[in-house]
Image (cartoon, rainbow, N blue to C red):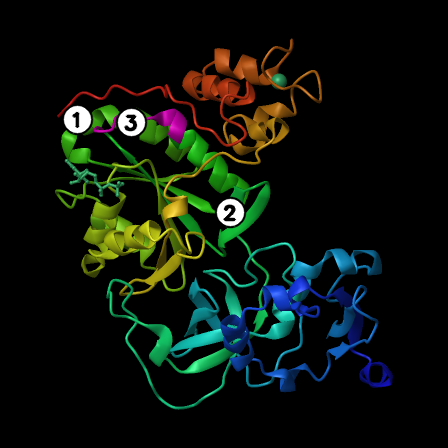
Amino acid sequence: MACAKKKGKSQKIRVDFRKNRAGRTRGDADLTRDVQQERFQEDETLKEERIRGKGAIFRQRTIHVEENAAGPAGETLLAKDALASQLRVAEDARPGVVLRVHGLNTLVEDAATGRLYRCAVRRLLRTLATSHRHVVVTGDSVLFRPVDAESRDSEYAPHDPDFTMETLPEGIIERVEARHGCLCRTSRGRLHTLVANIDQAILVASAAAPGLKPNLIDRMIIMTEKMGIRPVLCINKADLVDKTRLMPLLGMYARMGYASLLVSAVTGEGVPQLCQLLKQPGVRSVVTGQSGVGKSSLLNAVEPGLNLLTREVSEENEKGRHTTSAAQLIKLTGGGYVVDTPGIRQFELWDVVPAEVANFFRDIRPYCSLCRFPDCTHTHEIDCAVKEAVEENYIDARRYMNYCQIMAGDVVGGRESEEDFELEIEQG
Ligand code: GDP
Ligand code: ZN
């Protein structure tokens, strides 16, 4: 402890051990797994993390984080996640991007060189992972330390069934940076992060077959607003309809400030614009939308080499394992990444509470503060500025009705309504 004071720049925080660090009982011993875990353990870097012998029940360790890292004292123990991004790391650690997580192996791309590493996670980080199943998820920005300099480079080819991490140089993930734009899923009441640090979501809808569902578009937008991800509205199968019929709808979203594209995977129309949006250095996108709208077709048009992608993912699904860790970040030629995971093909409205719904409607939000009642829900109240704006046609009536439907609880809480309103577009 004295040494920590001398340095004067660190803060001591005590964290609980995870169960897996407590003494193992014979019954649950899994020797193979132990060997795999220990193989990568590099405790030399943990000099500053000392174990306090306090008996089996209240085992904690004291760790040092950078000054002011964990905020006011009262918050320190609650802020374990933030803490993971503040741990001191070895000096030779370098920035990397997690492309995928497979069991104990994490595929990390060196942000500077593009080289790939098969990384294990520093033991302390796993200790901190109490609220998430995985301490490292696809999309994480990490600091990692290569542990062998031997050059065993391998091309990253996610669509190549023979690709294996086994031959890659090894590394240790030392720190996970704070996350933004997370795609999550709840299972058994717990929230799991599937992918982190997504910048934009390409919300794919189809002009026809299946018919355009503006209410579904709204819900997808709400999710992106909630997650802090930039939505890009992408209406596919433009070849099937009279495009002028789509203009009022696209115009409405454009007026709200949402980027929107009209594309066709079949004719290639709009695909260069989609490429431009996706292929920006470092930008991480997710492509989402109802099944059958043409997400795979569009991705294949953007990156022709990806044609085996969907097959690979569904195979992984069939095995029934690693469903949550199957998410991968796919590097696009020319820059940028797209995420592919079966779990987020379609967004679900989860965890959106009625009080915040209006906030996620960009067209409704400006009127909310003008209502008579500060807690106006804009549904049944008198002197409601939102309802007045609808009457005056400042707010699109269809959007408002969808807002009411969401507020009525038809969709908040995870389920999507079955009988979704379909916009009739004349076939071209
Ligand atoms: P996903 O489920 O969203 O990945 O959709 P797919 O990419 O598998 O496409 C579903 C179906 O729509 C396939 O039969 C495609 O050939 C077809 N499709 C995809 N894009 C277009 C398009 O732009 N125009 C037309 N006419 N059909 C398309
Ligand atoms: Zn109101």
As shown in the figure, which amino acid type bears the numbered disc 1? Asp
Residue under pointer 3: 212
Residue under pointer 1: 242
- What secondary structure is found at the residue carrying circle 1? loop
Residue 277 seen in render: no
The residues tagged by marks 2 and 3 sit, at their Cα atoms, a distance apart of: 26 Å
Q: Nearer the viewer, residue 259 or 12?
A: 12
- What secondary structure is found at the residue carrying circle 2? strand
Who comes first in sequence, dot 2 or dot 1? 2
Residue under pointer 2: 184
Residue 302 drawn at (x, y percent): 23, 54
Q: Which callout, 2 or 1, points to the residue nearer the camera? A: 2
Question: Quadrant of residue 407 in the image?
Answer: top right
As shown in the figure, which amino acid type bears the numbered disc 2? Cys
User: Bounds of the magenta span?
Assistant: 208-216
Residue 305 drawn at (x, y percent): 20, 61
Who comes first in sequence, dot 1 or dot 3? 3
For residue 84, above or below residue 403: below
As shown in the figure, which amino acid type bears the numbered disc 3? Leu
Q: For the stretch drawn in magenta, what is the main secondary structure? A: loop
The quadrant of the picture showing ligand 1 is top left
Report the residue at 57% width, 27% height from top. 358
Who comes first in sequence, dot 2 or dot 3? 2
Relative to 101, 64 lies left or right: right
The residues tagged by marks 1 and 3 sit, at their Cα atoms, a distance apart of: 13 Å
